[in-house]
Image (spheres, rainbow, N blue to C red):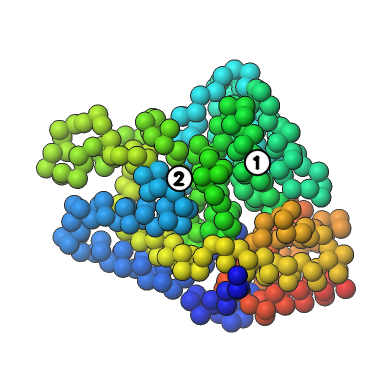
């Protein structure tokens, strides 16, 4: 599969800005900004925003998201955040006293706090998987799953160190002990392939503002069909059966829109967000997720190889995700390194004791060299 040529011309990134920080927040492509502006304009003339448009804009988002993830549109809910989605999962997964919830050490807080709360409410125990220093996360997670495991809540790759979790193996182990599987795919969906049919999660969420290249405040939640009759965490009008008929909204109904739609957030029909996210999905579908992953693997390795020559620690692809490079320093990140890089218009993140470097298709060789030149200056 051929690498994708640099797509910088589709973004409003100045030539002298070296933004290698997609895991923090993706810049919006020009087409995404245009779609969001179009969505905003649709609300500047509300007399032209028809009742059916409340539903059409949501279903366009849902169908594009479903195609990108390779799942049924009926299994996707529209959510504002990861925490909202995981609250839905927590409400709908049975857990008994004495069972365990497995998470990763130093996992992103949104995928920890909800499980701490659920453990406290049910008498379950939180089990923290810890990996060996040079390993991926898979073995640690599999060893943490046992007969008492009721729920496993993990990502595809760790948000800070980029190390991988083999979700197919974890899914199989979960099924063997009867445990539910909940995934936070915010740092992976759109940047690396995932076969939902093989992993078979109960719930899987991804916020749109990172690797899905969309706006903040919108996300997709996959819900396995066996949970479609579950309990929503809010009761809004638009998710009820027959809500398309505005003249009969006070004919209160107990039934819901089909599939996972009962779990959609309230006021979901927000054209700027939904249209912007849909335009971002169109870009990703045009490029292809497998091709994106291969291209970003080449980009991160083009940084990792010279960094290793400086005696900096960079995991190999396979142990880490193709798109997320963590650079470790002897003794930790040097003081003021991030501030110095920013003065040179080089933008990355500090996570834990490492530098997190996350390029995308808008990056080129000049961006990589700007980072490497500064690292050479500091460590040569």
Furthest-left residue in view?
A: 247
- Which residue is more in the foreground, 290 or 214? 290
Q: Position of residue 346 (x, y in %)?
A: 67, 72
Quadrant in which residue 41 is drawn: bottom left
Q: Position of residue 153 (x, y in %)?
A: 59, 37
**Residue bearing mark 2:** 221
- Which residue is more in the foreground, 294 or 360? 294
Residue at point 41% right, 72% down? 31
Q: CA distance from mark 1 to mark 2?
A: 22 Å
Q: Position of residue 222 (x, y in %)?
A: 45, 44
Q: Earlier in the sequence, mark 1 or mark 2?
A: 1
Residue at point 56% right, 52% down? 194
**Residue bearing mark 1:** 169
Residue at point 13% right, 39% down? 248
Quadrant in which residue 259 is drawn: top left
Residue at point 76% right, 64% down? 336
* Label 1 residue SS: helix
- Which residue is more in the foreground, 128 or 291? 291
Assign the N terminus to one quadrant of the image. Answer: bottom right
Residue 343 placement, left or right of 221: right
Q: Judge depth for marks 1 and 2 and give the one in front.
A: 1
Pointer 1 local density, CA inside 10 Å: few below 14, some 14–19, many at least 20: some
Residue 68 placement, left or right of 302: left
* Label 2 residue SS: strand
Residue 250 placement, left or right of 343: left
Q: Does 31 appear above or below 255?
A: below
């Amino acid at each position: 599969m051929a690498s994708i040529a640099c797509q910088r011309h589709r973004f409003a990134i100045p030539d002298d800005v070296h933004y290698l920080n997609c895991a923090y927040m993706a810049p919006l492509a020009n087409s995404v900004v245009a779609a969001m502006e179009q969505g905003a304009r649709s609300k500047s003339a509300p007399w032209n925003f028809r009742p059916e448009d409340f539903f059409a804009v949501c279903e366009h988002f849902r169908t594009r998201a479903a195609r990108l993830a390779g799942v049924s549109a009926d299994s996707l809910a529209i959510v504002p955040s990861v925490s909202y989605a995981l609250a839905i999962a927590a409400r709908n997964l049975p857990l008994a006293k004495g069972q365990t919830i497995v998470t990763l050490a130093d996992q992103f807080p949104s995928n920890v706090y909800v499980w701490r709360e659920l453990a406290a409410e049910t008498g379950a125990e939180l089990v923290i998987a810890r990996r060996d220093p040079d390993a991926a996360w898979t073995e640690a997670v599999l060893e943490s799953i046992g007969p008492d495991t009721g729920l496993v809540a993990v990502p595809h790759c760790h948000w800070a160190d980029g190390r991988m979790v083999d979700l197919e193996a974890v899914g199989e182990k979960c099924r063997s002990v009867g445990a539910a599987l909940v995934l936070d795919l915010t740092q992976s969906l759109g940047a690396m392939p995932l076969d939902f049919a093989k992993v078979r999660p109960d719930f899987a969420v991804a916020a749109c503002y990172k690797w899905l290249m969309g706006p903040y405040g919108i996300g997709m939640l996959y819900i396995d069909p066996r949970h479609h009759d579950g309990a929503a965490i809010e009761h809004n009008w638009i998710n009820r059966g027959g809500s398309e008929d505005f003249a009969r909204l006070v004919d209160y109904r107990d039934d819901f829109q089909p599939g996972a739609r009962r779990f959609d957030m309230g006021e979901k029909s927000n054209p700027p967000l939904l249209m912007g996210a849909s335009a971002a999905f169109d870009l990703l579908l045009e490029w292809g997720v497998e091709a994106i992953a291969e291209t970003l693997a080449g980009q991160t390795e083009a940084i990792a190889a010279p960094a290793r020559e400086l005696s900096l620690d960079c995991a190999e692809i396979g142990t880490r995700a193709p798109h997320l490079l963590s650079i470790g320093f002897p003794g930790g990140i040097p003081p003021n390194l991030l501030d110095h890089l920013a003065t040179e218009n080089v933008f990355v993140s500090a996570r834990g004791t490492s530098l997190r470097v996350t390029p995308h298709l808008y990056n080129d060789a000049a961006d990589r060299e700007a980072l490497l030149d500064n690292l050479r200056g500091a460590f040569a």
